[in-house]
Image (cartoon, rainbow, N blue to C red):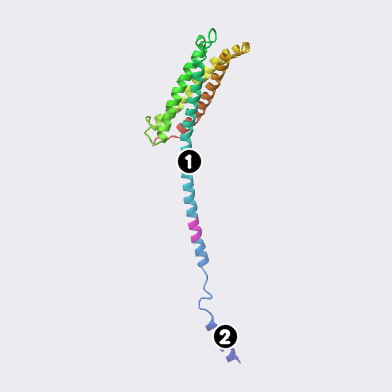
Amino acid sequence: MVTTDAAAAATTAMEKPPDAEKPDYAPYNGNSTADGGGGARTRSSGVVDSVVARWRREDMLDKIPLALHASAAAFAFVALVLVASNQHGDWMQFDRYQEYKYLLAIAALAFLYSLAQAARHALRMRGGVDPVSAPSGRLLDFVGDQAVAYLLMSALSAAVPITNRMRSAVVNNFTDATAAAISMTFFAFVALALSAVVSGYKFSKQTYM
């Protein structure tokens, strides 16, 4: 009886697969490799996303000054035309008032400056050569935008009081045209002020390497 039991146990042991008791390391090794590859892919994707986001930001910062300078040129041109054509005889002549002659001169300056800057930005965006080097161009944008915006504000400060006094006494084509010119000048000032903010940001972020 004992012999029969021993023989059965030996037969069962012989039928057991040789690797049944072998530890299974495959899942551990496989998971480790997969996790490592996934982490590398995640890091690579993060770097690519960061570069793409930087390119988009730089492209946007190049397009915004062009739009703002073009808008400032358009507003300044309308103001220039309104003031220059505001001649209705007698006291309703713009050249009888120093404030309006000053407004006309600054509107003309703002128009020429903004048009030149818009043309320069458009040329650079089309792949042309910027006539001004990059560091000097950023400095020109920053200083020029602030200077012309300040001059526009000074012209507004001179023209608004006399226009208010006139309109408090009489409202006619002369005072309406003057008020419209002042509004266009103000919009030109806002466009250049915003452009100065953008150019100031770009100037502060430039590198000299």
Side of 131 where 157 appears, left or right: right
Q: Quadrant of the N terminus?
A: bottom right
Image position, residue 76 (x, y; %): 49, 22
Residue at numbered disc 2 = 9
**Nearer the observer, 194 or 3:** 194
Residue at 52% across, 64% down: 28
The residue located at (46%, 27%) in the rendering is: 142
Q: Nearer the viewer, mark 1 or mark 2?
A: 1
Dots 1, 2 in contact, CB < 8 A? no
Observer-nearest residue: 128 or 198? 128
Of the residues under marks 1 and 2, which one precedes in the sequence? 2
From this view, report whether residue 106 is shown above or below residue 69. Answer: above
Please state the horizontal and vertical placement of residue 22, each as a whole percent of the image: 52, 73
Residues 128 and 20: in front is: 128
- Crowding at dot 2, Cα within 10 Å, few <14 / some 14-19 / many 20+, comes out as few
**Where is residue 21 shown, x and y percent of the image?**
53, 75
Query: Which residue is under mark 1?
Result: 56
Q: Looking at the rendered structure, which numbered label has been put on residue 70? A: none
Q: CA distance from mark 1 to mark 2?
A: 75 Å
Q: Amino acid at mark 1?
A: Arg
Which three-letter amino acid code belongs to the residue tagged 2?
Answer: Ala
Q: Identify the residue shown where x is 53% and y is 22%.
A: 184
Give the class, few, some or many, for how many residues have Cα within 10 Å of label 1's Cα (few <14, many ≥20).
Answer: few
In front of the other: 120 or 57: 120
Is residue 143 among the parts visible in the rendering? Answer: no
Please name the predominant secondary structure of the magenta segment in the image.
helix
Q: Which residues are magenta?
A: 33-38
Q: Secondary structure at mark 1?
A: helix
